[in-house]
Image: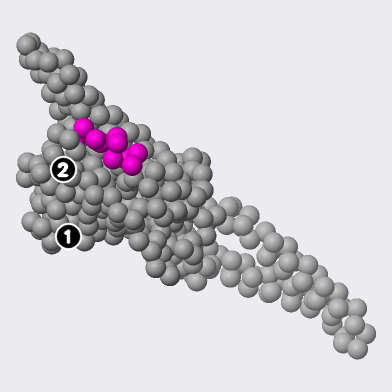
């Protein structure tokens, strides 16, 4: 810290001191009741000025080491700056130091979050590419081994693989738009029955090929939601049920309500979810034991469903007994302010 800079920072204090001394000197010299000679007034001014300068140089010497330490860090561009800062000398410096540490920590948290999101996005893209390659490879095999087979069977198998590809592409699109959700939603009344039937129709091939029975009960409720986004949520839950339900299984869809909420329940008698996994099924990229034991999964379906449901003002819960059933419930609270949908 240079002396010239320090004195410049103290310019207002110096000007105030000079004006104060002029005022006091004039009062003492011009006061007729007090006989003080001009020389004595100058002597008082001189001593006061020396003491004031001594104070300034003393403060400068006290703070110089602190500011030199900061200047050295800036010039040398050292790493881990926040932990190398010198100890503050004054209360003001302590406050600035605390503020700086808080800002530093906040920025570090934001950077870590960005890195985590980038890593998760890379993991999702990698997993998604591997997933979408499977139906593409199967489609090629269908074409190569189509000789002698009925055209209807070939087209049916080919259409099923195209549906899988379409589902993966749709999933990636919704994933890419989840952060800009607030720009693309329309809250309105929607009939659950129409949304359910559209989702079942979309995945009819899988129902037929795996001979899975669909049971739709009491689905005539109307809810306040965005039809497109809710349709995607139902698609993801239903696709999960189909994936983990063995051939000849059953999926039951029903709607119910009470004084607090309306609910859409999708239940299957598939392989279920292990107790240690059920608390993490909505985490991004989590596949669990089922996703690793012969059932390829990106771990994004339920994560997207849960995230979008919350943004719509809904919620999703899951209940399961391993080896017996899985029950997924979409909750539609009656007293939700849809003008305050999470951004």
Q: Is residue 155 visible?
A: yes
**In the rendered view, how is the structure colored?**
one colour
Q: Position of residue 21 (x, y in %)?
A: 77, 72
Residue displayed at 53% across by 63% down: 60
Q: In which image quadrant can residue 53 be found?
A: bottom right
Q: Main secondary structure of the magenta part?
A: helix
As drawn, which residue projects farthest toward the bottom?
A: 33
Residue displayed at 74% across by 77% down: 44
Q: Position of residue 103 (x, y in %)?
A: 44, 56
As drawn, which residue projects farthest toward the top?
A: 147
Q: Secondary structure at mark 2?
A: loop
Q: Looking at the image, do the residues carrying marks 2 and 1 touch, with CB atoms under 8 Å apart? A: no
Crowdedness near tag 1: few (<14), some (14–19) or many (≥20) residues, C-alpha within 10 Å:
many
Q: Is residue 285 visible?
A: no
Q: Position of residue 101 (x, y in %)?
A: 41, 60
What residue does disc 2 label? 212
What number is the disc on residue 217? none
Range shown magenta: 197-206
**In front: label 2 or label 1:** 2
How many angstroms separate mark 2 from mark 1 (CA)? Answer: 19 Å
What residue does disc 1 label? 320
């Amino acid at each position: 810290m240079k002396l010239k800079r320090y004195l410049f920072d103290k310019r207002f204090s110096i000007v105030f001191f000079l004006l104060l001394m002029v005022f006091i000197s004039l009062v003492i010299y011009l006061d007729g009741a007090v006989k003080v000679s001009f020389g004595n007034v100058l002597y008082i001014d001189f001593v006061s000025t020396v003491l004031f300068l001594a104070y300034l140089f003393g403060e400068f010497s006290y703070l110089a080491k602190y500011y030199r330490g900061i200047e050295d860090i800036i010039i040398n561009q050292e790493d881990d700056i926040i932990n190398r800062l010198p100890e503050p000398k004054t209360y003001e410096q302590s406050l600035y130091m605390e503020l700086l540490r808080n800002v530093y920590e906040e920025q570090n948290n934001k950077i870590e979050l960005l890195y985590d999101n980038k890593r998760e996005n890379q993991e999702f893209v990698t997993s998604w590419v591997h997933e979408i390659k499977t139906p593409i490879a199967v489609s090629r095999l269908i074409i190569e081994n189509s000789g002698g087979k009925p055209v209807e069977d070939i087209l049916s198998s080919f259409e099923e693989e195209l549906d899988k590809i379409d589902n993966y592409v749709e999933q990636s699109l919704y994933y890419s738009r989840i952060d800009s959700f607030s720009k693309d939603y329309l809250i309105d009344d929607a009939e659950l029955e129409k949304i359910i039937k559209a989702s079942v129709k979309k995945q009819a091939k899988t129902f037929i090929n795996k001979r899975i029975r669909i049971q739709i009960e009491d689905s005539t409720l109307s809810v306040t939601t965005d039809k497109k986004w809710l349709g995607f949520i139902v698609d993801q839950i239903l696709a999960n049920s189909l994936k983990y339900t063995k051939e000849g299984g059953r999926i039951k869809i029903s709607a119910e309500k009470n004084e607090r909420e309306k609910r859409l329940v999708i239940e299957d008698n598939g392989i279920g979810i292990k107790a240690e996994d059920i608390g993490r099924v909505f985490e991004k990229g989590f596949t669990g034991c089922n996703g690793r034991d012969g059932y390829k999964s990106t771990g994004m379906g339920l994560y997207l469903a849960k995230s979008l449901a919350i943004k719509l003002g809904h919620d999703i819960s899951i209940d399961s007994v391993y080896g017996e059933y899985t029950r997924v419930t979409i909750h539609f609270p009656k007293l939700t302010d849809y003008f305050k949908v999470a951004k």
